[in-house]
Amino acid sequence: MKKYLLYRDTSPKRASINYEKELNEEQIKVVTHKEGPVLVIAGAGSGKTRVVTYRVAYLLENGIQPQNILLLTFTNKAASEMLHRVEHLLKMDTRYVWGGTFHHIGNMILRSHAELVGLKKGFTILDNEDAKDLIEIVLKEMGLSGREIRFPKGAILREIFSYAINTMGGIEGAIIERYPYFYHLKDEIEAVYEKYSRKKLEINAVDFDDLLHYWYRILAENEDLRKYYAKRFSYILVDEYQDTNKIQAEIIDLIGMINRNVMVVGDDAQSIYSFRGADFRNVFDFPKRYTDCTIYKLETNYRSTPEILNFANESISHNKKQFHKNLKSVKPHGPSPVVTALRDVIQQAEFVAQRILELRDEGVPLNQIAVLYRAHYHSMEIQMELTRRDIPFEIRSGLKFFEQAHIKDVISFLRVFVNEKDEISWKRLLKIFPKVGKRTAEQIFERIQATTNPIDLFTQKKIGESFKRLSKDTIDTWSSLFAELKELKEKEAPADMINTVVGRVYGDYMRYNYPDYESRLDDLIQLANFASKYHSVEDFLSELSLMSGASGEEIIHPGVTDERVILSTIHQAKGLEWKVVFVVWCAEGRFPNSKSMDEDGIEEERRLFYVAATRAMDELYICYPMVYYEKHFGYVILKPSRFITELDTSVYEEWDVSESN
């Protein structure tokens, strides 16, 4: 093992950066910290990126060699931009700083020591789609694939394997936490994982999670290498530390064990990604693992008005597990945040759309307005109302609601009852069933075209006479399903048709095919509730077609091409900011989510509410519907979210618009 001598240039240098001019007092303390572990609690809008950038510059300016600095960020772009800024500040080359994501650095380490984990040099990195495809190959080799087999598909297994590695909890732990409905398949899933792992070694390939897994193994299993890298990186900086998972924290501890100059920067109040494996305990327990650490707090906010920060501070104060801080604004006073109860989801959408138009008239660009929500389906009525009013919007949380695959799959069943010659819908719905692939679907449709009553082919089981390879179970399912749908179509009950498709066939299909099964199921429940307002299947489908085909363009001013209201889940809005933010569906059971009602779950939901509020620069609107129609329960009275009722009323203004319109 070659020895690596750390080199520190101790010759005096003239400072080229005026830190007192560039940074506030809180930031200077962090940037100029001398030795030892550091936890920086960086409040929202407090200049965290600026602090990390100037910290790197300070180290370089004080003689630390670039190759002795490790900068870990959550995107390579972030690291690149920080180091480019350092080059601009110091007029020096930063290419030898080890900067990038955990996966990027893991790749660099693994390239040097591939043989220690059974790989050869020049190994291939599989992207997520490649990994899914390789898992599907393994499933086929093990006899667990095929349309007749009820086994989780490659995309779901990839998510299970990823969660297991990142949390270091094993396959069983991942299944229990994230996919408990697959526990009866635990042994088979573990066997797939073992074969998938061997397969990757055989083809000299790794997936993204292996970059962390093998990096950790190299450090944990090789004492000389562990000491080598621990000596090499005399200063380690980790950005967005609240979003790290267990294996990332373990890696940092291993390479920080000698010099102990580990500076982690983040905000415990913005730890909202536990569903991805991020571990809130990493930031919360840092002082326990590094008992000699110094804690700094960045509490000066440059983004939001004092009124918005008072609202956010009051909200997050209700969390028990946190590093207490009090964000202070440097901006002038603005309007108080607004809390408004709306009659129902329709009036909620109308209020948001109308206020957006008023803001636009007041000079606020559309792309400086965002509508944020807890779950993607919360945006459905908003999308529809914005479209009706020709207000252009951009969805950051995925496809438009009615363009999503699972929505189109279920709707295809309704479409064939309105238009029995709808080729696209027939082929789409047929491929949902076992042993029906593209070719079989085409052959079945040819049979459909040749008959005058296609639905009867299925209800009377005549389709089985032409396609002997179809299982008796599939033929029986078609017969009973299409008979029930035919009866519901005659009753003009689109909502009941949707619930029947989901309950009889599509719910299980989603469970075994989509990693985000539960959120897709929520979408379909919302779709059925929306459909219950229509007393004609044709009218319902016509409305969907019009909504899918329309796009608001008319209020964009000439020459302006990028003005669009932003619609986003709060998770995907983290790190961003807008002049005006609407947070919708702030009703108990919706936000906080009804599935997150234990103490840890509620505290993460409150952190999510805090993140939503602190995206707003000038104006913040918190909205909730008072009444909601559910197909099986009728009209349900909704309570305002506990995140509203627990607030002191002095931090917001109430608007009563429920009786208007």
Image: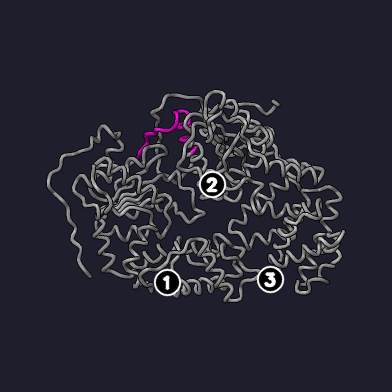
Residue that carries the numbered disc 2 in the rendered image: 602
Q: In whole angstroms, how far apart are the C-alphas of marks 2 and 3?
A: 41 Å
Q: Which residue is mark 3?
A: 148
Q: Quadrant of residue 84?
A: top left
Between the C-alphas of marks 1 and 2, the distance is: 44 Å
In front of the other: 419 or 344: 419
User: Residue 329, image x and y in percent?
Assistant: 40, 30
Q: Is 312 included in the stretch rendered in magenta?
A: yes
Q: For the residue marked with disc 3, what is the amino acid?
A: Glu
Q: Is residue 223 magenta?
A: no
Which residue is at the front of the view, 120 or 407?
120
Image quadrant in which the C terminus is located? top right
Q: Please say whether residue 646 is visible from this viewpoint.
A: no
Q: Residues within 10 Å of mark 3 (few under 14, many from 20)?
A: some
Q: Is residue 604 above or below residue 392?
A: below
Mark linked to residue 204: 1
Q: Nearer the viewer, mark 3 or mark 1?
A: 1
Residue that lies at the very extreme toward the left in this rendered image: 11
Q: At 47% across and 28% down in the image, what residue appears? A: 307
Residue at (52% x, 27% y) in the render: 364
The amino acid type, in three-letter code, at marker 1 is Asn
Q: Please, which colouring scheme is shown?
A: one colour
Q: For residue 233, which quarter of the picture?
A: bottom left
Camera-side mark, 1 or 2: 1
| Identity of the residue drawn at 58% across and 61% down | 179
Q: Say whether disc 2 or disc 3 marks the residue closer to the N-terminus.
A: 3
What span is in magenta? 297-315
Q: Is residue 169 visible?
A: yes
